[in-house]
Amino acid sequence: MQVFESLLQVKIEKGGGFFLLLDPDRTTPDMILMLAEAAEDSEVDAVLVGTSLMTKNNFQTTVKDVRERTSLPVIIFPGTHSQISPNADAILFTSLISGRNPTYLIDEQVKGAPLVKEYGIEPIATGYMLIESGGYSSVQYISHSMPIPSDKNDIACAHALAAQYMGMQAIFMEAGSGARQSVPLSMIESVAEYINLPIIVGGGIREPREVESKIKAGASFVVVGHHFENNNDLKALHEFAEAAHPLAAVAL
């Protein structure tokens, strides 16, 4: 079974999914390995590896080490085409559809596509939407793009629908790592009602109850990374993942 297909099955069976994001630029190698090993027992559904700005020469090593320590899907969440590894199972093949900078709309994708093919990594075509978060995020700075205003649900819906019509498989609504404000519930609800694609939501999520509220609003998957970068409370990791699985809780 392909990775994306298996994740859709998770959504059906559990009511939602939880992704742990590991950032090799911001998290120590020891912490990354600790989190990777704990992810499976904590009911995490997939591990994402990626960063906005790669300042260390450790991406390939990180993906390889994570792959060796978990049987969960290891999915690259790339900032640039240089963040592609043959040790990953899949890659969120993102296009920054909320921006107008051609570098992140198509240029990085053209550079990365041959490597994805050569390595045999499963591409998951993803429309990436940067949402205003109350501050100037790393993604916004690096990509030279304006985020969608957090109170403009109609603009978010139009971008998401365009991604669907262009044949993308998923939408990623991102507030940015460590965002002051996460993606508003009203925006998630509006987009979920407007399109027929699974929605991934990340950025600025600090508590399990926020994970639960995003899923109830219409998110299929929730991503948390920054909260665990310097936090070894593995019990909390389980609580975050559990909050994304409303149907699993009902079954119990």
Image (spheres, rainbow, N blue to C red):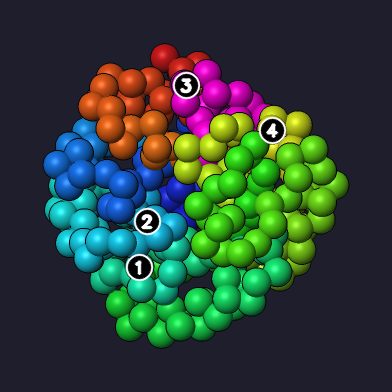
Q: Which residue is mark 4?
A: 184
Name the N-terminal-most of marks 3 and 1.
1
Judging depth in this view, the residue of 239 and 145 nearest the camera is 145
Judging from the image, what secondary structure is the residue with disc 4 in?
loop
Q: Is residue 117 magenta?
A: no
Q: CA distance from mark 1 to mark 2?
A: 7 Å
- Quick check: marks 3 and 1 in contact, CB under 8 Å? no
The span shown in magenta is 203-218
Q: Amino acid at mark 3?
A: Glu
Q: Which residue is at a point 76% across and 45% down the rendered structure image?
A: 149
Which mark, residue 50? 2
> Is 74 placed above or below 248 here?
below
Q: Within 10 Å of the Cα at label 3, are there few (<14), some (14-19), or many (20+) other Cα atoms?
A: some
Quadrant where the image shows the N terminus: bottom left
Q: Residue at x 75, y 31 (%)?
A: 186
Query: Residue 198: x and y, percent?
Result: 61, 48
| Residue 71, above or below 114 | above
